[in-house]
Amino acid sequence: MPAIPHFSSLLYWAFYLVPVYLFIIVPGLRALFPHQTPGPLLQDDFYDDEFTGGLESVADDTEYAALSCPEDPYRVHIFSRTPLIVYIENFLSESETNHLLDVSEGKYKPSSIYNGDSERVDFSVRRSDRALLDRDNVVRCLEERARSFQGWRPYLHIEQMWTQRYNVSGHYRHHFDWSGSGGAGDRVSTFMVYLQMNGTGGGTNFPRLRRPRGAEWCRFIECDDVTGKNSPDRLKGITFKPIEGNAIFWENLRADGSGYLETWHAALPVLSGTKVGMNIWSWNQPPSR
Ligand SMILES: *[C@@H]1O[C@H](CO)[C@@H](O)[C@H](O)[C@H]1NC(C)=O
Ligand SMILES: *[C@@H]1O[C@H](CO)[C@@H](O)[C@H](O)[C@H]1NC(C)=O
């Protein structure tokens, strides 16, 4: 017949088992199952993983935080909702414009075009000179302006900027800024910024966009086309005037990564004087898993 344990021996075991439970078993369980340990509710518990993941993924965040940039100087007008096209007045201040023109001087090289994997200069397609801009603080502040304009969209990467100089007869035939490679590795948006125009011609033409009603837009787009309505020379669509300091922003890609055909555009030939423009291209670069 098994012996009924004596009350004093239960106390004896409890004397050893309580500390073992408190100091070994409980901490061991906490380490193994951290979320099951009830504890005080912290504010951090309310953030979900995706939200923090998106914030952490933005490249160079600390770099931009350390900059002290001037207030954004611009005014915006929505031109189109689908695709999103926004006209931006005074995107650049005069001192920023002058700085960009100064640092480009002496760095211009003929612009090339890409055909599959070969690069060449072809004046019949694209005639201009371009200069790659160093990422000085003025340029970094422009990158931050472009990021802020786009709501600090996660995974956005700003391509290193080029200025483009067009002499008389300089132009760029109709093209897309997107490649159609689908989402990652493509230009989600474009800022076309005008730095200098001291002559005529050189507008940015979008043949697939419709001219808005009303005369308000005539400040920014060509409204007085002198060619007859049925003339083959008549330009289709709309043409933005190259106005110094102003910019056009447009989205190239839909949410699914496919490109908007409406963004087909050209730099029309410069007829007199010199035009200098600058592109700011944003890429969608989610982290590779
Ligand atoms: C534009 O003019 C400059 C100065 O005359 C010249 O060096 C350059 O080659 C010209 N660029 C093009 C693309 O014609
Ligand atoms: C336009 O500016 C360029 C410098 O970028 C200069 O060489 C040219 O003489 C100017 N032309 C006119 C008509 O002012």
Image: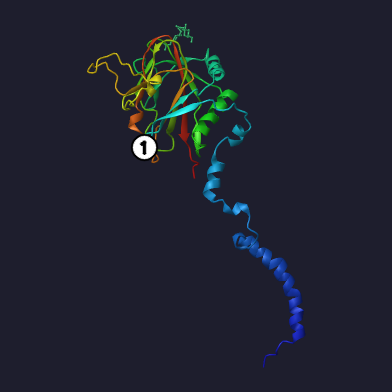
Q: Which residue is mark 1?
A: 258
Q: Can I make out residue 276 in this image? A: yes
Count of numbered marks = 1
**280 lies left or right of 262:** right
Name the quadrant containing residue 42: bottom right
Residue at x-position 61% and y-position 52%: 44
Q: Is mark 1 within 8 Å of ligand 1?
A: no
Residue at x-position 34% and y-position 25%: 214
- x and y percent of residue 264 in the render? 34, 27
Name the quadrant containing residue 11: bottom right
> Is residue 117 placed above or below 41 in the rendered structure?
above
Q: Residues within 10 Å of mark 1 (few under 14, many from 20)?
A: some
Q: Quadrant of the N terminus?
A: bottom right
- x and y percent of residue 111 in the render? 43, 18
In the displayed orientation, state which residue is furthest to the bottom: 1
- Mark 1 is on which residue type? Ser
Q: Nearer the viewer, residue 94 or 35?
A: 94
> Is residue 24 placed above or below 184 in the rendered structure?
below
> Is residue 283 placed above or below 113 in the rendered structure?
below
Q: Can I make out residue 136 in this image? A: no
Colour basis: rainbow
Question: Which element type, helix, strand or loop, lies under badge 1?
Answer: loop
- x and y percent of residue 203 in the render? 38, 18
